[in-house]
Image: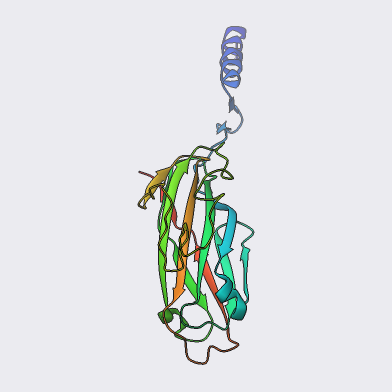
Amino acid sequence: MNKKAFTTLMAITIALSAVGITYSAWTDNVYIEGKVKMAHVTMTIISDKVLTSKEVQRYSEITYERSEDGHYLAITSNNLKQCWFVWVGLVLQNQGTVPADLKSFEYYFEGPDGFEDYFEVKDYFYGPYPENMGFGTLEIWGTAKVSDTGPLKPDGDVTFTTIPNTPPFKTDPYEKSVVWIWIHCLDTPPDSNGETVVLYIRIVDDIAI
């Protein structure tokens, strides 16, 4: 190889290296290095409440626990009978990188066969709200309590002045939403005395198109 050809080859090699491409004269392979960031949807429960009446508390012990990933809430209760109910409050945040559609929840029961046939559910969605919104002063969260006059009524109605949204609706990254869910026992399930039931409430979301 003459001097001129060698100089030309070196110039090409240096130019390719400058744009992130390495050329090997020995193997004739080209290697390109880079990073790819994938979009993801992550709707997460960041705060929760479970409320009921003093009457229900007299005969039924109710506990609840949020999953570590914030994708579902598990509610455990015993001695279910007719008119047993809870109000479940959830603050959700889109912690993904793309807009997401927030949809109605999925419900799963763990207990004696057929228990799920004795329940009815109503849900009320509010939002979305900006990331920096504090919920302590909002009527849909900070002042929520169970009462015959509201805002969370034992019969499943609400008296908030804020109008609920209808799912599915779009939430941008880091926006928040509030959901109240009324879960009611229509009749006393057979052999329910002392039995424990676990109800799972799971978030359903999808990329907003």
The single residue placed furthest to the bottom in the displayed view is: 191
Give the position of the N terminus as an image quadrant: top right
Which one is in front, 16 or 98?
98
Q: Quadrant of the C terminus?
A: top left
| Residue at 58 percent of width and 41 percent of height | 134
Depth order, front residue of 150/181: 150
- Give left or right: position of 206 versus 43: left
Residue 43 in view (yes/no): no
Residue 47 x, y percent position in the rendering: 60, 53
* Tag count: 0
Q: Nearer the viewer, residue 12 or 21?
A: 21
Given the current orientation, which residue lies at the most extreme top position? 4
Residue drawn at the location 57% of the way across and 70% of the way down: 75
Locate residue 186 relative to residue 8 in the image: left or right: left
Q: Height in image: 201 above or below 187?
A: above
The image position of residue 169, as x and y in percent, is 38, 47
Residue 39 position (above or below residue 12): below
Residue 6 placement, left or right of 166: right
- Observer able to see residue 166: yes
The residue sitting at 63% across, 76% down in the picture is: 61
Color style of the picture: rainbow
Q: Quadrant of residue 15?
A: top right
Could you tell me residue 176's position as x and y percent?
Answer: 51, 44
Residue 129 image position (x, y, % from top left): 48, 40
Image vertical order of residue 116 relative to residue 208, above or below: below
- The single residue placed furthest to the front in the displayed view is 149
Residue at image coords 61%, 61%: 66
Q: Quadrant of residue 121?
A: bottom left
